[in-house]
Amino acid sequence: MSNLRMPQSSFGLTFQTGASILDYEIHEERGYALGVAGRKVEVALQALKDFDAVGGEGDRAQLVKAAAKAVWHYFIQREACGIRNQRPAIEHYAMPREVLARLGAS
């Protein structure tokens, strides 16, 4: 007598329903939005670093405000993705205390 078994795949059996397809698309969109928000943080923080490096003319306070706004949006998007611990992001982007203080963080 031979053993019979169902065909196996590395992904297991998955059934696509309207809800599972929608869930996948929502997760995909959240990930994309998180990436966009992360790039905005990079740009805003780089503008602040460039200003400080050159000692440029202009309103530094506006750059800090823009960086804080980008970081705030990024944190909101991370939380929407279920990521509650912001410490790794703060360290990864080397977010200045000055920017975080505008968010009420320390």
Image (cartoon, rainbow, N blue to C red):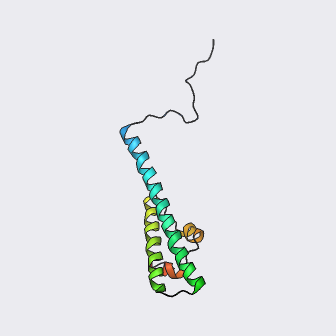
Percent across and percent down for residue 5 are 57, 22
Q: Is residue 70 above or below residue 34?
A: below
Percent across and percent down for residue 66 are 44, 76
Percent across and percent down for residue 23 are 41, 46
Q: Is residue 1 above or below residue 41?
A: above
Report the label total: 0
Q: Is 17 in front, or is 35?
A: 35
Which residue is outermost to the left? 18
Which residue is outermost to the top? 1
Snapshot quadrant of residue 69? bottom left
Percent across and percent down for residue 51 are 55, 82
Snapshot quadrant of residue 3? top right
Q: Is residue 82 above or below residue 17?
A: below
Q: Is residue 50 left or right of residue 77?
A: right
Snapshot quadrant of residue 22? top left
Q: Quadrant of the N terminus?
A: top right
What residue lies at 51% left-to-right and 82% top-to-bottom?
A: 98
What residue lies at 53% left-to-right and 74% top-to-bottom?
A: 45
What residue lies at 55% left-to-right and 74% top-to-bottom?
A: 46
